[in-house]
Image (cartoon, rainbow, N blue to C red):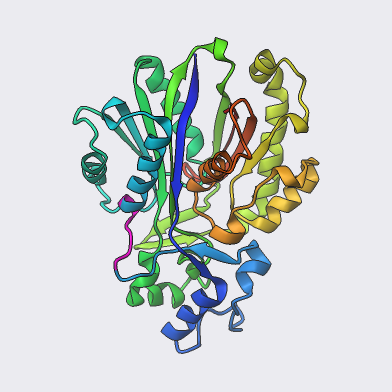
Amino acid sequence: MRTLFAGTGSYVPQMVTNEELFNLFHEATSGTRPVQKNGTLIGSDWPERYFGIKSRCLDLTDNAMTDTDLAVKAAQIALKDSGVSSSQIGVIIHITPTPDKVHFQNHFADLMQRLNLATDVHALYMDLGCCALGPALQEVRAHLHLEPDTFVLLISSQCVSPLIRNNERLLSYLNHSTEPFAWLTTGTVFSDGAAAVVCKQVDDREKRGVLRTWTGCNPSGVIITYENDFYIMNGAFVKKNFIPTMQGLYERMLKEWDTYVYPVVEKPFSSLLVKRWYFHQANGNIIKETADLLKIPVDRIPLLITREGNSSAVSTLRLLDKDRRDGTVQEGDLVVFFWTGAGNGAQFGYSVVII
């Protein structure tokens, strides 16, 4: 039995350009922040030069959307796309590093009521970063094995706009006493967004669904920490490890192809068999380097980070949703996900899926 994606949905707020964001930074600090370690003022071209980011999605309006608002919007779109009613959902899994209510999964109360879910729905919260879709798909598979007639609603969301909208909060990042690049998490790299997928179990004879998902972690590697009310990203770790991690995942996929993929597609591996390669959107420049190293056709690796920033675990699922809606990916196409991100130290994983 396999997990099949019955429907997808995603949502992001408006785009904010590098110039618009850095104008906010400079206005908040009278033109004195952000700065390099040597004290040199950083200009608005910096995110594009170092991360390939030209804009990101943020809600800086007075009546801004919350993390829950984003999650509900994406979930509603996915449910409509799947043709599944909310009453048929037996399990809901929510991935977010920025829940509106931190403890006791109380943000689920809002999600359940606004989505009209049954009160006996099994709710699972995953406080993980960019690689969370991997372990989440493992959870989906386990739940569908236990209850094969149910549907699982998997939602990923992220909302970093509150770090910017609150001027005092923004200043605390821009003037951080020990981390000169603490401001990277305040919308410079990370962004708002949500994506969702409705999953069901299908018989192996359908030759569709999730063929393989594998995840691992490096407990000694830390990508992001949350300490003293600050999110701090270890950009140097990401830069050093992204390409080797993607290379390792690619090699593992090749080794496992004959076991998990060949019995379904009945073809030896070829990069051309893969319609889309969904790399975690950590750094646009490094993703291009990875594509060159692995000799993957660049036109099969969509880039979202350039326009929408890094929405963590949302990003690869949003890429799939966009591709499905514009017809780039259709039923029967094979796609591959490669992830790395914060969680259990540093997580990484991959998945092969026939849509």
- Is residue 238 shown left or right of residue 342? right
Residue 53: percent from left, percent from top: 61, 63
* Quadrant for the C terminus in the image: top right
Q: Is residue 245 left or right of residue 206?
A: right
Q: Quadrant of residue 306?
A: bottom right
Name the foreground residue: 115 vs 99: 115
Instruction: Tell me if I can see residue 121 in this picture.
Output: yes
- Magenta stretch, main secondary structure, is loop
The answer to whether residue 220 of the structure is visible from this angle is no
Residue 1 at x, y percent in the picture: 49, 13
Which residue does the image show at 45% across and 76% down from the upper left?
A: 174
Q: Quadrant of residue 199?
A: top left
Judge by depth and name the residue closer to the eye, 303 or 172. Answer: 303
Q: Is residue 266 above or below residue 87?
A: above
* In-image side of 324 versus 244 (left or right): left
Residue extent of the magenta highlight: 63-68
